[in-house]
Amino acid sequence: IYKMWEEGGYFRPSNDPNKPNFDPAKKPFVISIPPPNVTGELHIGHVMFVAMEDLMIRYHRMKGVPTLWVPGTDHAGIATQLQVEKDLLRTEEVTREELGREKFVERVWSWKEKYHSIITSQIRQIGASCDWERERFTLDEGLSKAVREAFVRLYEKGLIYRGPRLINWSPGLKTAVSDLEVEYSEEPGKLYYFKYMLSGSDPLTETGEYIPVATTRPETILADTAVAVHPEDERYKKFIGAKVVVPMLGRQIPVIADDYVTREFGTGALKITPGHDPNDYAVGQRHGLPVLSMLDREAKVTETGGPYAGLDRFACREKLWNDMKAAGLVIKEEQYTINVPRSQRGGEIVEPMISEQWFVKIEPLAKPALEAVRDGRIKIIPERFEKVYYNWLENIKDWCISRQLWWGHRIPVWYCDDCGKQTCTRTDPLACAHCGSKNIHQDPDVLDTWFSSGLWPFSTLGWPEETPDYKYFYPTTMMETAYDILFFWVARMIMDGLEFTGRVPFETVYLHGLVRTEEGQKMSKSKGTGVDPLPVMAEFGTDALRFTLLVGSTPGNDSSISLKKVEGNRNFANKIWNAGRFVISAINSLAPGSAQRTDDLTEWTLADSWIWARLETLVREVERLFQVYQYGEAGRQIYEFFWSDFADWYVEVAKLQMAAGGERSFNTAQTLARILDISLRLLHPITPFVTEELWGHLRGALLTSPLAELAKDWPEALIIASWPEPRPEETWQAAKVADFALVQDTVRSIRNLRAEKKVSPARRIPATIAGGGKTAVLKEQAGIIAALAGLDPSLLSILVSPPAKPENSIALVAGQVEIYIPLSGMIDLDAERARIGKELAETQVQIDRLEKLLGSDFANKAPQVVVQKERERLAAFKDTAGKLDSQLKG
RNA sequence: GGGCGCGUAGCUCAGCCGGUUAGAGCGCAUCACUCACAUUGAUGAGGUCGGGGGUUCGAGCCCCUCCGCGCCCACCA
């Protein structure tokens, strides 16, 4: 099977027009998604991705659409670096700095190989495959080229700039992280109140004038460059323009007025630290304040901090505060809940710091990206995420793209040591483009993971080259991912796609929900709450896990994985297998060379017609649901059909029909085979393994049977078989379905009675059935009714209406028929009267309800189809009520 | 502070963007291993769809409001 996929260009674009997957005349289905990340840690959430995409791919594949599933990795990811650093530290006690870039990168590649083998085996087990050889080629050469091209283009358009900006600094990782990578958590903290003394005032005297200020991060006092008050604040108005003294440092800074200050909060006066707070930075820009930095790359105090230089940020906080206490500058401390910014990767507290970084001007990219979704060129499923998308893009800030790491695409900018200017080119420059000096050095930073990932839909297809792959497969069709990555990745791919290719990168974004643990927790590596799918697959089977994930979820909604559910779906897989075994044994039991295939309706029994009609309805429904991405509902309907209709009812009837032998058994085996075949095709995208295996056996059995004709055109494997064609409903179908439903109702009500009266299942009982208008149908089905309801066929009489009510019988009403079961010694007249009376009352409630409904405006205003349906139901209830009434009297 | 989602049977969730008497799985109760399947079959109990109001011939679904959860974004010292 894998070989067929590969030869069919299942995963990679195939440039060979002779290969079956490459049909220039057909619009291909392309899905864009990376497999699990390179750190090799896999949890069930990853299975969700791959299973959902595999479903989509298989479905289109079976429909004859050329398909392509482009795998990628987060090859340049910070996660990779962290993982490797962790391993290095553990095994060799070497730090990033000690190793140096070159050796470090080499080491990462060696880890990457190791992880790939894990990932590959894991992906294979859930029904996919990856061509890592080509992948690696693409990553090493093709993608790097694309990233370079993208950067240079933006640079040349003036959309990339370098500047001092306040960024989120991660002291542990020693790199900038983007706003999106920062998470805030509410934690207990303190609000520190202290005195900003007016210049010349003495804190230790009564007359010392000061401005009270509150802060949550006292250590940043060392980098304060102003104190701000509201311009209208009566308390502090008089100080505006005056100078105050920075505690312990003695620097003089101005008191300024700014609307930004909230008079009601804290003391109403605000210390301004442009170097360590984004809002203060903005205030500082407005007032032309200097920017001081009191922390270095490792979050240790710089020389700005004077006597505190060299201290860790938290140690500094403590010492400074104690010193201030001693100096009489402290007012009070207050318990206060603060929002602490923490790094998404690692969890340490992030410091806002001023730093030279590279940025992308985002607005020119964001506008077209907004338009693309607004005008419907890109559709997001479920729709509500479009609002989230708009909201984010409308308020987006420039994107910090530089990272101070080794592992990643390096920023292709060289600085001239002589003239100081920048050179940014598509190939590595040997000299400065401005002065020709050969004293140039490359920027040490690498690009944010998402810079390269954003190019992914086209960079993997060969862009910027106009390769055949790119021309044929781009734009892609479907982007399938979890909703939590909408901003990180999806939005950036859209922006990049429009910017670099002028086209949307994909037409549809399908967002699945997050898979949570049984307790509803988010699966997370750092919290250790991830559920390893491999043991689950080992215990219950991959199909069971896939079915659980795909059918147990609705687009964009989270779902909890529970082993109970997986177990239930394992049972379903088992049911498929066993039903299949039955069908195959039925085929094998046919006498060789007996009869010919027939399409003559009259040769079919009611059950044959019924199951066929039900199946055709199912095919139509599944197709409709797949079109609107309702995979879960489609799966549920297939489950329902296969278990309840096919296995519980049709197979039971088929046993009787097989026993009849001759033509009947021949036709029955044929129906069993055809229903099973199509069911397996419908199920294949969801549970590929059991269906593939079983279908192979089915095909083998058919080909060596008198029914060989049936499987003559089937391909060698289900994965390349065709998808069932939905057909319009035929006129005979509704009547057959209704007739069989009557048989089912009759059987059920007898079974019900037997259970209630505790009649042994082994005991064959007599019955008289008054069939009314349906007598002919029931007579024809007498054998089935008798067998399924445990009746004695020789004591079963089916009449239009019995000449007299049978004596000593329990009377049942099932739809249009009345059933009399003589059960001597088991009849309690009072109890029977009560039972029938209760049924009659329930029926009467329905009659009253419907009469009222039909007597209201409903009859005039509702669509006539709906009204007609209600009228028919009313008639049926009246019929039932009449029968119950006469039974009560009898 | 802004936005989004959820609340349906004891539990976990469907209910496909207004149309039968609201469904499934698990769990529970009773019965049955001659049967392709005990990873099974048969039968049954169980819900005033979070509360209130409104629109409509008709509301689990649409509108308003309240209550209880959860998530995302922004980050006022």
Image (spheres, coloured by chain):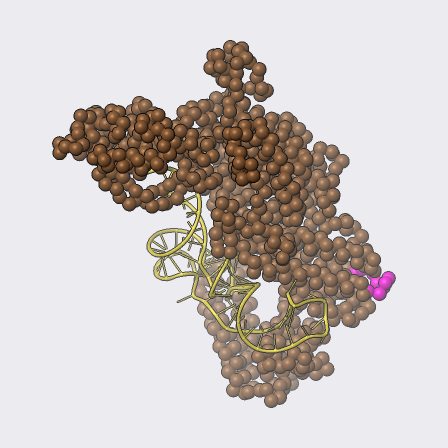
- Out of A320 and A12, give the one closest to the viewer: A320
Helix, strand or loop for the magenta stretch, by majority = loop
Q: Pinpoint residue A839: horizontal percent, then vertical percent.
A: 52, 77
Residue range of the region highlighted in magenta in the rendering: A590-598
Please indicate whether residue A299 sits to the left or right of residue A7 in the image.
left
User: Which residue sits at x=32%, y=23%?
Assistant: A290
Q: Pinpoint residue A11: horizontal percent, then vertical percent.
A: 67, 40
Quadrant for residue A619, please give it.
bottom right
- Tint applied to chain A in the drawing: brown
Quadrant for residue A321, please give it.
top left
User: Which residue sits at x=47%, y=34%?
Assistant: A173
User: Which residue sits at x=84%, y=65%?
Assistant: A591
Asked whether residue A732 is in view, the answer is: no
- Out of A290 and A688, give the one closest to the viewer: A290
Quadrant for residue A217, please give it.
top left
* Colour yellow maps to chain: B
| Position of A4 relative to A312 (above/below) | below
Asked whether residue A592 is in view, the answer is: yes
| Position of B52 relative to A133 (above/below) | below
Which residue appears farthest toward the right when viewing the image?
Answer: A593
User: Which residue sits at x=19%, y=28%?
Assistant: A198
Please indicate whether residue A41 sits to the left or right of residue A861 in the image.
right
Q: Pinpoint residue A843: horizontal percent, then vertical percent.
A: 51, 74
| Position of A551 relative to A650 (above/below) | above
Q: Is residue A591 magenta?
A: yes
Q: Pinpoint residue A551: horizontal percent, then vertical percent.
A: 58, 54
